[in-house]
Image (cartoon, grey):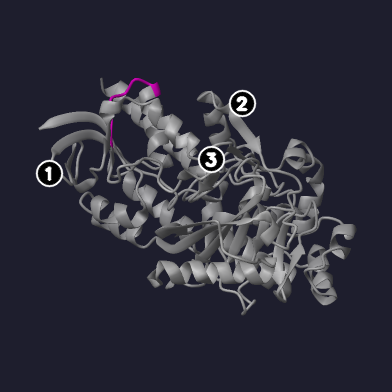
Amino acid sequence: MSRVAVAVLGGGISGLSAAYELHRRGTPFVLLEKSHRLGGMIRTEQVDGFTVDAGPDSLVTQKPAAIALCEELGLGDRLIPTRAPRTAYVVRGGRLHPLPPGSVFGIPTGLGQLAAHRLLSWRGRLRLGLETTAPRDRGAREPGDREPEDREPGGQGLGGRELKSQEPGGREPGGRDAEHRDESIGAFFRRRFGPEATDYLAEPLLAGIHSGDVERLSIQALFPQFVEAERVHGSVIRAFRRTAAARAGAAARHGPFRSFADGLETLPRTLAACLPEHALRRGNGVAALTAGPPYALETADGTRFTADQVICALPAHAAAPLVAGVDETLGRLCEACTDTSIAIVVLAFPRSAVAHPLRGSGFVVPRVEPALSITAATWISSKWPGRAPDDHVLLRGFLGGARRPDALALSDGALVDIVRGDLTRLLGIRGEPALVRLYRWPRANPQHNVGHLARVAEIDRRLARAPGLHIIGAAFRGVGIADCVAAGRAAGRTAAEVARSAA
């Protein structure tokens, strides 16, 4: 039976980042991926002059890990910003309402923005503005209180999505912050901003981007900057107002998102090209894993080998039965991590067939809008340059998630018809599409619900009893690409150091 220093399970961005770090440090490894392609949900197609991202389409600049990796790979000068104007819209009453410029997730930081917030009624705006006087949560720290001793120094920014740590919530799992009372995004927003802001801001903008339920997703795990704002400043609006100047820099001029002219798959494709081909085992996933070290692995084709260390970068539902072979409790903890499924429908039309000016990046649809089935849409050709011929527009609609968990049971034709019908009503589209693409993503969106941080803390405690086993990926320590890159490289770095000390 052959033996390898490190086995990386999964060839998505987390696994590729771990493999890259191992290779960079001269540590032998093998990467096992059941699919014949690498990159996971990051997938781009070039079709008839259109550039179509089938999954995520951008990297965020506020979390530096992914951008830093691009620069390290020589891709820095190929990163492009989104096109102006970068206006995002929210549907209310069948109409698109723009979010005020400079707002944070639709939350205004000044009176002018509040007055211009036409999405909300006067009553809703008044209640939102009263957030500055709302009482602090009972578990919040008072200004001047000492930081918990086990918190990573440096803190985290409060300017929108600026988070320092790549752990969930920007905190060490199991630390004192993880034990702070958790609550759902919906509960936090109702308490601070009122019910109308919860329905038309929190649900479509915060829960919607995770394809989740606003009453279940954890504010601590996904948007810790809101919790920190309340703790430190007693008001989210006051905290964001104080950091408005910091947000008005390069990110405001060029937007917070970056991609590549030929689509986001440029990143995993470049990563894979940096790795030794003999170490990449495509089309051959892991079938069994038993306790070590060394850990015994069996692949789908029956190959058996051992590894001194294992970096598991699989979705939680795929990791659960494997790690159960090492620790049954660890397997149950992974199995308890939930997820949702989505369908993405991409449509192209002649520009003359779409009445809406499409000046912006797209829109989200609140759950309380009963006449629409889609959760959001992106105007790809307005968001990114060069994604469609000049005389065409490229649109992308989202369906499913917690709002419609049965969506993937529908036929391809039904999914396309639903998205096309909603876009037609909202944007005034005539005629037949010039391009149709449908992408199904079953169980692809991890749900960091209330209690997620405590579960991850327990996973880490169990991992301490299984030396050489690492569990990473979007299901555990941050769902964004930057989070996955940071966690993957950290695991690769740790594994390389252990391998070097054992040599």
Chain-order first, disc 1 or disc 3 = 3
Which secondary structure lies at badge 3? loop
Closer to the observer: label 2 or label 3? 3
Q: Can you tell which quarter of the image residue 138 is in?
A: bottom right
Report the residue at 51% width, 60% height from top.
345
Which secondary structure lies at badge 2? helix
Relative side of 370 to 129, left or right:
left
Give the label on residue 263, or none: 3
Instruction: Specify start and end residues of the magenta stretch as a single range.
Output: 24-31
Give the label on residue 302, or none: 1
Toward the viewer: 135 or 236? 236
Which secondary structure lies at badge 1? loop
Residue 10 visible in rendering: yes
Provide residue 452's location: percent of width, then percent of height: 47, 59
Q: Is residue 74 above or below residue 355?
A: above
Q: Can you tell which quarter of the image residue 39 is in?
A: top left
> Which residue carries the number 2 mark?
77
Chain-order first, disc 2 or disc 3 = 2
Closer to the observer: label 1 or label 3? 3
Chain-order first, disc 2 or disc 1 = 2
Relative side of 274 to 323, left or right:
right
Q: Residue furthest bottom?
A: 370
